[in-house]
Image (cartoon, coloured by chain):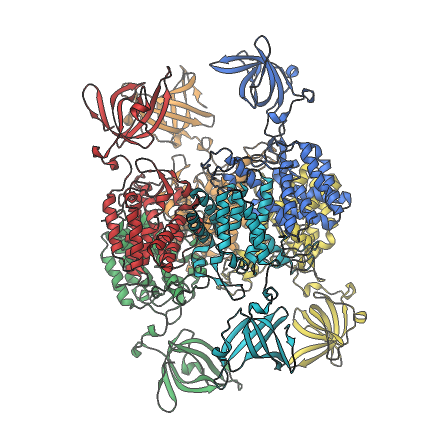
Chain colours: A green, B orange, C yellow, D blue, E red, F cyan
Amino acid sequence: MNFTYLSGGVSEGYCIVKTVEQKLNVKGVPYLDLVLSDSDGEITAKLWDYKESVHGKFEAGAFIKVRGTLSKYNGVDQFRVERIRPVTPEDNVDIGAFVPSAEYSGEMMLQKLCSYIDSLKDEELQKLTRALIEENAEKLLFWPAAYKLHHAMRGGLLYHTLSIVKLASAVARLYPAIDRDLLLAGAILHDISKLDEFELNPVGIVKSYSVKGELLGHLVMGAMRIEEKAKELGVSEETALLLEHMIISHHGTPEFGAAVRPMFLEAEILSELDTLDATVYEIENTLSAVEPLGFSARQWALDNRKLFNHGRKAAIPKANLE
Amino acid sequence: MNFTYLSGGVSEGYCIVKTVEQKLNVKGVPYLDLVLSDSDGEITAKLWDYKESVHGKFEAGAFIKVRGTLSKYNGVDQFRVERIRPVTPEDNVDIGAFVPSAEYSGEMMLQKLCSYIDSLKDEELQKLTRALIEENAEKLLFWPAAYKLHHAMRGGLLYHTLSIVKLASAVARLYPAIDRDLLLAGAILHDISKLDEFELNPVGIVKSYSVKGELLGHLVMGAMRIEEKAKELGVSEETALLLEHMIISHHGTPEFGAAVRPMFLEAEILSELDTLDATVYEIENTLSAVEPLGFSARQWALDNRKLFNHGRKAAIPKANLE
Amino acid sequence: MNFTYLSGGVSEGYCIVKTVEQKLNVKGVPYLDLVLSDSDGEITAKLWDYKESVHGKFEAGAFIKVRGTLSKYNGVDQFRVERIRPVTPEDNVDIGAFVPSAEYSGEMMLQKLCSYIDSLKDEELQKLTRALIEENAEKLLFWPAAYKLHHAMRGGLLYHTLSIVKLASAVARLYPAIDRDLLLAGAILHDISKLDEFELNPVGIVKSYSVKGELLGHLVMGAMRIEEKAKELGVSEETALLLEHMIISHHGTPEFGAAVRPMFLEAEILSELDTLDATVYEIENTLSAVEPLGFSARQWALDNRKLFNHGRKAAIPKANLE
Amino acid sequence: MNFTYLSGGVSEGYCIVKTVEQKLNVKGVPYLDLVLSDSDGEITAKLWDYKESVHGKFEAGAFIKVRGTLSKYNGVDQFRVERIRPVTPEDNVDIGAFVPSAEYSGEMMLQKLCSYIDSLKDEELQKLTRALIEENAEKLLFWPAAYKLHHAMRGGLLYHTLSIVKLASAVARLYPAIDRDLLLAGAILHDISKLDEFELNPVGIVKSYSVKGELLGHLVMGAMRIEEKAKELGVSEETALLLEHMIISHHGTPEFGAAVRPMFLEAEILSELDTLDATVYEIENTLSAVEPLGFSARQWALDNRKLFNHGRKAAIPKANLE
Amino acid sequence: MNFTYLSGGVSEGYCIVKTVEQKLNVKGVPYLDLVLSDSDGEITAKLWDYKESVHGKFEAGAFIKVRGTLSKYNGVDQFRVERIRPVTPEDNVDIGAFVPSAEYSGEMMLQKLCSYIDSLKDEELQKLTRALIEENAEKLLFWPAAYKLHHAMRGGLLYHTLSIVKLASAVARLYPAIDRDLLLAGAILHDISKLDEFELNPVGIVKSYSVKGELLGHLVMGAMRIEEKAKELGVSEETALLLEHMIISHHGTPEFGAAVRPMFLEAEILSELDTLDATVYEIENTLSAVEPLGFSARQWALDNRKLFNHGRKAAIPKANLE
Amino acid sequence: MNFTYLSGGVSEGYCIVKTVEQKLNVKGVPYLDLVLSDSDGEITAKLWDYKESVHGKFEAGAFIKVRGTLSKYNGVDQFRVERIRPVTPEDNVDIGAFVPSAEYSGEMMLQKLCSYIDSLKDEELQKLTRALIEENAEKLLFWPAAYKLHHAMRGGLLYHTLSIVKLASAVARLYPAIDRDLLLAGAILHDISKLDEFELNPVGIVKSYSVKGELLGHLVMGAMRIEEKAKELGVSEETALLLEHMIISHHGTPEFGAAVRPMFLEAEILSELDTLDATVYEIENTLSAVEPLGFSARQWALDNRKLFNHGRKAAIPKANLE
């Protein structure tokens, strides 16, 4: 643990509550049994004589500051917690060092996304995308893109969205028949209802799907959001309809969750670029753990393929979003 | 044709415009070339010296009254139209004798459906279903349920809906764990957005899918309708969510168009009963054209199966909705 | 264990042999090492100085009465068996309290089924179903319907059969083209060769599939039973053929084990109702272990779906067979 | 047509009735409008003043002798029938020259098959196969093996059966673990219920599937035949069961009609050899119509493949059954 | 036809032989019966008293110059050919005006492709791609990319290749883990053996697949070409292997013809971009024939989808390759 | 272990190194921790004071001779190695007794295969097969045919190849349209590039797939081998093409790894016989571990089937290759 050694055997530091359980000692007095983690590793910890009214309540995923003493128990390090509290903005600590996070700040990515919105020439599409992005800016700054698969990290949703917007922009330059505004608007909004689909833990990592997320999915919820916002802003039905179709078709085929299959050019391209970005991430992520000239195990999320690390370049799951 | 013979070689009667095309005769004068149909058969007809300003405009599917004279042309009957006009309510003619129609009146079926709504004990579900049915009552009275497959007839949507509601009611009696109100509300509303999915011709038969119908489908549109109406009526999000899930999952599997698969009992049962009613109709309809102890051709809509008419009972596509 | 305490540390009670193994003690003397269970729980037990000629032979699944003394061994309860014998009818104990069992008695369900047979108007169908049900009445009173899936309980076969017959009866009321006699006869007999498909343990729970069950399956065996019985009773070939088709097609598609696909209305409906009853049971059974607003794990037997407990009604796998 | 010219413009010859329809001439007098065929070609024919009581009744597929006069009608040959009658054994004409037929006589193939039966060492298997082949010998002499696909010719069933028996015999020599008797018995009987599956026209070519053939299929019917015959002959249940399993599994997978999948070695091999013989026939038959270095059209019966005629050897659908 | 009118009823012009057949007139004298086409339309033509030794031989697809007289036959234009000869380079006529052709010249596209080869930093990859492209430059200038689907036009192969190279270049900018040289080399060579896969007609449109093309496919042939060339040039086995894998996997899945699935990042991306370019072309090409707000028929090559022309931009199958 | 007891507590014997790991004792001195195996069982062993320069280097799979003393450690046998060295030819020990091996010698099988090559009448095919077999004779003598599935044993590749050649020869006798030379040449060479596909451990059992094996597969590599060798030997392109097609199609369908589907008779038969031999082996191998009248577990490699041991003959995975 990257704890700071104070004096008298006392250390303190920031960490994440990995697991927490309230137990009783042999005298029937409650204590907390915790596992704490930071980028350096994990440690088991005890908070003896735990009183919720005094110490506060902590759940898995909480970002905290602790102070206490380190000892050995059966040859294993153990931390005896003296003080514990949630991290506050005043601590000025970057959560990114503690949980998987995009390597760009949410603010930078959001600003970049907004500059693409500014570039849209179709006023309705600009108005609609701006409204939906701005209203949700706070969450977007850190929202992850997935539970377990690609971009399951703080800021992952913006990261994935921006990657696709950049790809879309390049593709639109190649094929003059593409309606760039429509394609970019669809790319910007395609996963917007992932904001409704997950329950996060306190540090911004997906804890589970939400009930609504399971019962409707982010495709149908996304179309509903657009329907409602378009009515509110007076965006024409025709425009809203095209975007809604792009949202509910962007998984490509029913087998992968699309409610309908893409029926026009921009919908099809959005769907293919979504696959491309997710696949690149998955492959790079998988190969980053395979040594050169080695093969990975079969990857369920990649159609049960093995992957090969040819070793010509380091495999890192990263996009150049500058 | 069931035309009435007047005097002087003149006949008149009601019929449907099956096809209509404006042409020019050898002198360059416009005339209408028509095919007219009623339950007795078809006839080709000409309206010479056609002027839209005088005679009006007619499209395929129009329900009209004509008067004119019958003659032979190359040994085939041909009708020379003298007068032509749309049928009006004052004519008091039943369209049901001219196009495929449910054997129950729309009014009777709607009333029956409303009595099921009355039977719901959950106030939110009752309020929501009542509002959506009553608002759309006018269209429901004659709306068909399909383009080419099951219940592609005037009144087919109510016919199919009511059949499923009756099945649902019976199934709910058998299994005590079923929430009857939820199941019935889902059954009543499951196809409500078929009202948005088709373009009809003037006599109430599907002419084509609507643009919106193709791009979103009646499942997603149905969920949107419920979302909007539930907000308007103050129905709780939880209740709306369950119904929305039932709507978007009622085709059972993605392969058959479900946006998600049914995840609770009432959603699953609705989906199975929808299949049951459609399949029964398809089988009966197919077998009604096969003689006893004979086999049909392979039926695309039935998984490419042949069907056998065992001849123990007459095959008629009919439900007992009394 | 629901054992009765007698005097002198001695208890006695009825229970099921969950596992049994003959072992040798350190002196080479045989003893039985058992696990016993009743609705209250399980206990390990020893029968020292076991002699088969004296005590009898016991296999897993046996329903027995034991008497003995309870002690602790390494802090765990252990039962030292003094006396052990199979339960006999004279004990007048209901096995249903010891193994998963239908909540209706076999007699009640059989009588109900026979009343449906009485209602058949087609004499051949009545004769044939009556013969096959009556001949197998003894087994039917307790036979389960499955190894691991739906209705894997004592009496499950009659329970499942009667549920489908009730559904069939309701469906036949809705669609006048259905030959009710044929549909009900098929429903009554559709799983009759499950009697040949399983090996049961002594308390009437499936131990394994029989060799014949694996090599032929209950569909083909069922058709063979009907063929043989129809010849014996002089039932016409035409009638037998229709029933045989219903039996071998009732799993709907080859993928699910149907030898042919249903080719007439009654065969198709039987197949769909079979699916409906099994699915309802599976869903209710799964959800009965999920708390309100929670989701189940993915269910292999339900196409790998997660299920949602919406909590509006208690989930219990039960049908109203009165 | 290979007709013989007599004197006075009169010809006569043997032929097959390809189509026949009874019509009325302009005076309302019935006549027969026929198409007749032999190995040389086809001709249209008229039988004026047709009286069933005088001329007899003729259906498509009948093998007949005609006499009459040839004339031109609109530049096309037409035959005016004077006399017409079915061919009788006394005519001593070989039907094989008129319809597709195996190049070996039925008698030769049956004798060959019986010599394989003689070679079985297992008495039960020998008794059972002998009984079933001998009882059906008359039909087997000419029965075809299919409606449209492989071996759809007179004698095709024996031809296909014998080919597989010869393959099975060779395979059994290679793998010592094979029970040769079981494999050969299964091969001999695997398609026996094709005798029940087709309706033939008078010259021994399949006219259609029988009702029983459609509703049960030759696999299930075959197992039923064995079940019944085994009981009659006192063959043990174990032996009958193995054969029944081989019959109902010999199409390999449910997708191709197997009621269960092969579960032991001999069943699997039978199924693979059945595919092999059918595929060889289909490929040879297809390529026999393709010129060297050319490709066929896509073949539905071969998984939609194109085939290539490499021209190294002539493609003929033939097996060496001597 | 864009023929030039000379004097005396005589016209002349350039055109393509669409069909040609040698026939005999009533006197038994040979003549050619032709259909000729240019961008303006088609015309039937006759070349009377045809002598191959005098007029030369012409096959379908030939690019010719004709002179002759126009007349009416049964009210239809017909051309009587007086002179006919193949077009020669001296005619200086652009074939592009007569058959579907890329809108960029082969030379321009080839030069562009070579500039990408120049940009490769890996010497082996540069050497190998340069050799294979330069050796085949003559054919590449006009070779089409397909028989019936995307880019079935003169120059289509370079057009499709260059589009993918441009996409690949953009994608490599986004993801730093991509080995740009490897990806581009794979993109440049991925369809190189389409040069072996088709037989062309004289104007450079695919007439049929070659025998080798059918039996091996351009994926396996492409890998063989690389293997052979790499050995010749002394390119390392490791490098050749990676390229060979990219070639044989670029159809993505076995279902679409890949011999193996892509196992590293560059192989996967190549496969996805290949799909993207082909799909964009198919969609644009399909929609170019659909009017705004209309739907196409189902497209076999697009997974049987209907497409929607939203009309926001003109649909033209074109890439910006400048 | 089949070790020989010498005097003074010392034993020696031949065995296989199952696992080997270099460790440090508490004093930091290296030792080897091994598991050794022979046909009798396994034993753990220690080589104290290990020095690579003295003792040599040993990897898993090595075939060695050891001498040392046996002792108990915690009640378990342990072997203290005194001497260790690789087995050499001079030891004259048959490796077949230590690892799974074909029951025929490599030499015998190779000779048999060569006699089939001698029997080919087509000179090109004979020349090509002879060259490829002779060049690889050394490896073929012991090469296995698979990693985990059928014929994963020393000599398995020749065993499997010869079995198929024998089947092919029998099939060619039955169907006169088969080009025997082509079929046999394809059978002889079909798996030749399995020599490139595996990395073996020292005793000739597959350790893993090679990089090349994973990235190209033995089908494509096999075609490349033939292409290269045919050019070298001056074999005609036509002949090489047919063989190459047979190699890349011999897995039958893309789903099972075929690059293209078989398009002529000999290619199809080769593919079916390859399946047959592999399936027979899998079934026999599976059933050899099942007792009579018992069922196996589901077999992944057999389409997830259970298998039945009918017990009429012993199940042994063996072919009669004499």
Corner quadrant of residue D8: top right
The furthest residue to the left: E7
Front residue of D149 and C319? D149
Q: Is residue D275 shown above or below A43?
A: above
Residue B321 showing in the rendered view: no
Task: Find residue E54 and report its horizontal and vertical position in percent.
Answer: 29, 23
Count of numbered labels shown in the rendering? 0
The furthest residue to the front: F90
Task: Tell me: A127 left or right of A293.
Answer: left
Task: Find residue B121 and report its horizontal and vertical position in percent.
Answer: 50, 55
The furthest residue to the top: D8
Corner quadrant of residue E233: bottom left
Q: Is residue B120 shown above or below D16?
A: below
Q: Is residue B155 shown above or below E190?
A: above
Residue D201 showing in the rendered view: yes
Q: Is residue E132 shown above or below E101?
A: below
Task: Tell me: F314 left or right of A163.
Answer: right
The furthest residue to the bottom: A8
Query: Residue at coordinates 39% horizontally, 90% vertically from top-left?
Result: A9
- In which quadrant of the rendered image does the N terminus of chain E lie? top left
Front residue of C173 and E50? E50
Front residue of F111 and E200? F111
Task: Find residue E298 and report its horizontal and vertical position in percent.
Answer: 39, 41
Task: Tell me: B147 left or right of B178.
Answer: left
